[in-house]
Amino acid sequence: MPPKPKREVDATNADLDLCFLSGVSFLESASQFFDRLPLDVDDAARVALAERGRLFVAATNLALSVELLLKALAIARKRKVLPEHTLDALFAALPSDYQASVEWVYRQDIGSSTAPRCTVLRLYVTPKGKALALDPTPPVSGAKSSVADLLLAERDSFKLWRYIHESGTPAGTTHMTIQHYYLRMIAAVLIKHFALDTQSHRILRTMCFSPKKP
């Protein structure tokens, strides 16, 4: 049988505030874990490995947060919203001028921020269910990437981290990454745009959920 077409959500029937505030809450939950990671790459990897259950939850929540914030922007702009998790597709569905604005603000914020040494967590999940956490990626790689490129790299993060217990197939090791620092920077930019777009001054307080400076 041919695959069923994806069902689009009519933005006029979607709850804008609920979508946005849920995204903010998932971001806040994820930040509670990532903000307390040590600055040193090796120390951060050890903490992530020791608390990998919390890491899996935080990575899942962070990816879902960005997804919901992108959908909230689409709803605010009266765009059709596909019920999917792929972050790059959701970003590409926004108006082109809006994408350009998000990219510009992100570059300004990245340029004025100092990234911690640990910006990416990379896990290797083996067939026996053991996980090793490493972070060989320096901050400059994420800093030079566009929002579109980062979301493309993290497009399936929600599905991968949510079902990590099914990873590590007999065929070999599964590689998992989460660019937590830059994803949270993107989330903060999306929050700013939502606040300006909806003129909701009551939600400007959510800007404090951007990554803490080292």
Image (cartoon, rainbow, N blue to C red):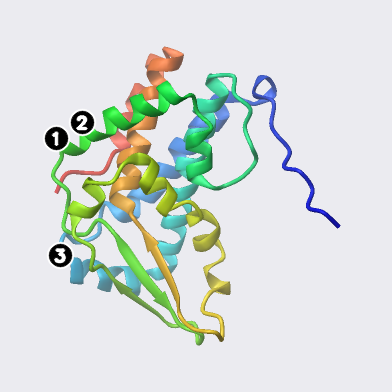
Three-letter amino acid code at the position of disc 2? Gln
Residue at 69 percent of width and 31 percent of height:
9
Residue at 46 percent of width and 42 percent of height:
65
Mark 1 and mark 2 in contact? Answer it, CB < 8 Å: yes
Marks 1, 3: nearer the viewer = 1
Q: Quadrant of the N terminus?
A: bottom right
Query: Secondary structure beneath disc 2?
Result: helix
Task: Characterize the local packing of mark 3: few (<14), some (14-19) or many (20 or more) Cα atoms within 10 angstroms.
Answer: few
In the shown orientation, is residue 141 left or right of residue 17? left
Residue at 46 percent of width and 15 percent of height:
198
Furthest toward the right, the residue is 1
Query: Secondary structure beneath disc 1?
Result: loop
Residue 90 visible to an observer of this rendering: yes
Q: Which residue is mark 1?
A: 112
Three-letter amino acid code at the position of disc 3? Asp
Q: Earlier in the sequence, mark 1 or mark 3?
A: 3
Three-letter amino acid code at the position of disc 1? Ser
Task: Characterize the local packing of mark 2: few (<14), some (14-19) or many (20 or more) Cα atoms within 10 angstroms.
Answer: few
Q: Which residue is mark 3?
A: 40
C-alpha span from label 1 to label 3: 21 Å
Picture coordinates of residue 115, whole percent (x, y)? 17, 48
Residue at 53 percent of width and 41 percent of height:
89
In the shown orientation, is residue 106 left or right of residue 173? left
In the shown orientation, is residue 186 left or right of residue 162? left
C-alpha span from label 1 to label 2: 6 Å
Query: Secondary structure beneath disc 3?
Result: loop
Disc marking residue 108:
2
